[in-house]
Amino acid sequence: MNSRFVVLTAVLAAGCLLITGAARTQSPSAAGSSASGKIGVIDYRNLVEEKLRAAADLYRSMMDEFHQGRAFLLELMVVIILLIDLAFLFRGKS
């Protein structure tokens, strides 16, 4: 897994969180509820939230893949250590 890709995805997700948080802090009266519908602010907000969900799903799947790879590596190391121990056991004391 490319660590640059993980960092880029995390930065994208953080940016989407900031944009969504800023959009949520504005009340409809402050933004002008009739004007916001006309210029597509609600559509933009929905698009940002959809992209945020997609980025979160991508991040979650990448982290799952990373954890599976790490678990496989740890299991492989345990098997190697076991084989080394068995080799010394059957070889006997020299």
Image (cartoon, grey):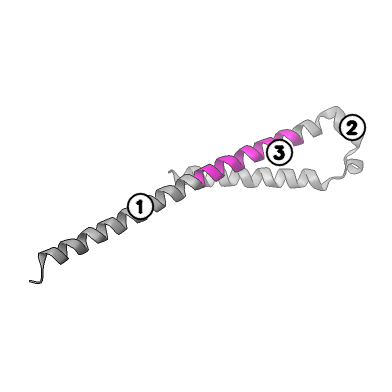
- Which quadrant of the rendered structure holds the C terminus? bottom left
Identify the element where label 1 is drawn. Answer: helix
Pointer 2 local density, CA inside 10 Å: few below 14, some 14–19, many at least 20: few
User: In the rendered structure, which segment of residues is drawn in magenta?
Assistant: 45-63
Label for residue 73?
A: 1
Identify the element where label 3 is drawn. Answer: helix
Name the residue: 72% across, 43% down. Answer: 19
Q: Is residue 65 left or right of residue 84?
A: right
Front position in the image: 37 or 82: 82
Mark 1 or 2, nearer chain start: 2
Label for residue 35?
A: 2
Pointer 3 local density, CA inside 10 Å: few below 14, some 14–19, many at least 20: some
Report how far apart the C-alphas of labels 2 and 3 lie in the structure: 20 Å
Residue projecting furthest to the left: 94
Viewer-side label of 1, 2: 1
Does the magenta portion include 62?
yes
Label for residue 48?
A: none
Q: Which residue is mark 3?
A: 49
Front position in the image: 13 or 62: 62
Quarter of image, res 58: top right
Residue 75 placed where, x, y %?
34, 54
Q: Is residue 41 left or right of residue 58?
A: right
Residue 10 placed where, x, y %?
57, 47
Name the residue: 86% across, 27% down. Answer: 38
Viewer-side label of 3, 1: 1
Does the magenta portion include 6?
no
Residue 23 placed where, x, y %?
78, 43
Residue 62 placed where, x, y %?
50, 43
Front position in the image: 10 or 62: 62
- Which quadrant of the rendered structure holds the N terminus? top left
